[in-house]
Image (cartoon, grey):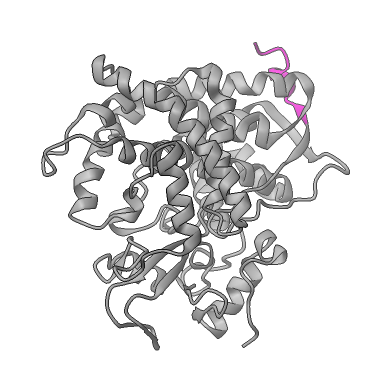
Amino acid sequence: MTEINFFSEDLQNDPFEYYQHLREQAPVYRDSMTGIYHVSTFDDVRHVLQNPKLFSGQTRSARDTGSPRQHRVNQLFKDKGWLPASTLIGRDDPNHKQMRALFNEAFRPAKIEAMDAFVQETAEALFEPIAAAGHCDWVQAMAVPLPLTIIVKQMGAPASDLWRIKSWTDAFFKRISMMLTEEEEIECIEKEIEAQHYFQPIFDRLRAEPDDTLLSDLVNKPIPEWGRTLTDEELHAEMMADTFVGGSETTTNALSAGIKLLIENPSVWDQLKADQDATLRPFIEEVLRLESPVQMLLRRATAETHIGDTLIPEGALIGVRYGAANRDQQQFSCPADIDLARKKPGAHLAFGSGIHHCLGAPLARRELWWGFKTFLDRVEQARFTPGENDFTYQPHCLLRALKTLSIDLDLKEDTIDQP
């Protein structure tokens, strides 16, 4: 079959035709540029995710000592900051399970439920300047600040530092894109180290004066099986990967995608207007399935095995293509369409599967609920602002992130004077 360049601008902006080609012609496709085996069908992706002993989150093999570039990157962290340790996604059980227990308490249903009013208030407050102006870049006005405000509060950082923190999360986001030159990667790491020096005094303060934030728990609660609390290197890794980026970036991307899909599909909007109570949750699940904010993550084969008919060598990297699996026609009828009556609407893989299933999924769904509901409750009609949208996505091999979404909107008459 024709070679596929996963780094091309065309694929980055619209990968779904490529995914269909992969599912039909090469469901396990070895990329000659990287050696990665890309898995694209729903059943194969689920097989990889649900067999963590065979497909490890530790994507460097024991024999991999790292490239010269990686050594230079590591040394920069050591010289100027803290070399981040493995994050949750890069750990295997039992180590992964032991560490994840720290987060489970923070994301248990009762705590998420208790945050509901704050999420609603935040979404409604963010919408007020949008309503007053009648237009906005939805990405910057709502999709970025809503989930980031929530995680900033959870981590006990000042709300006034939100956009400063965003500049640091952007650096991490870019660094994991697999798209940077070494010079660009170094620039991103310098920003991450800046973030490390911002958070290190907070770690030190919380050790002396614990409070009720999630960050205080991460700093102070020991992992029983380890007989210790997290190190600074582990804390800095979790701050960027699993809290600020994992806890905001993917929700940002789904919030952006959902409004774009609403404007493109007026019949779906009509269904939501007719019966929001019955259709908003299915709409959220369809946005997650169709757009898959996490398009791909990597695993490594711990032994020689087969995926389908393809032999996978021990140590091979596996590209787990969530974005392809979630549009698999063998699993979902009319997979490119929004179907608000779809049976089992949450039976997609946008949040993963198995031991690494996203622990922040309930909070993400709540943020999406209030982000979309606030829009639907206030907006009668919305349009793409003429001449201001090119609908391009950030260059990234793992995540799908719309750069901007400029919209004009008309408010519902009975909400125009709403404070």
Task: Indicate the position of residue 132 as horizontal and vertical percent values.
Answer: 75, 18
Reply above or below: 341 against 45. above
Looking at the rendering, the stretch of residues picked out in magenta corresponds to 409-419
Task: Indicate the position of residue 10 as horizontal and vertical percent values.
Answer: 72, 65
Please give the count of numbered marks on the rendered protein: 0
Relative to residue 294, is residue 314 drawn left or right? left
- Whether 391 is among the magenta residues is no
The picture quadrant where one finds residue 220 is: top left
Reply above or below: 71 against 124. below
Reply above or below: 190 against 42. above
* Viewer can see residue 279: no
The picture quadrant where one finds residue 247 is: top left
Q: What residue is rendered at 88% in x and 44% in y? A: 387
Relative to residue 1, is residue 318 drawn left or right? left
Task: Indicate the position of residue 151 as horizontal and vertical percent values.
Answer: 44, 29
Reply above or below: 406 against 345. above
Task: Indicate the position of residue 410 as horizontal and vertical percent values.
Answer: 78, 28
In which quadrant is the N terminus drawn?
bottom right
- Whether 412 is among the magenta residues is yes
Give 68 or 230, whichever is nearer the viewer: 68
Q: What residue is rendered at 49% in x and 50% in y? A: 285
Give 408 or 390, whichever is nearer the viewer: 390
Q: What residue is rendered at 62% in x and 28% in y? A: 377
Relative to residue 406, is residue 395 drawn left or right? left
Q: What residue is rendered at 21% in x and 41% in y? A: 101
In which quadrant is the C terminus drawn?
top right
Relative to residue 297, is residue 391 drawn left or right? right
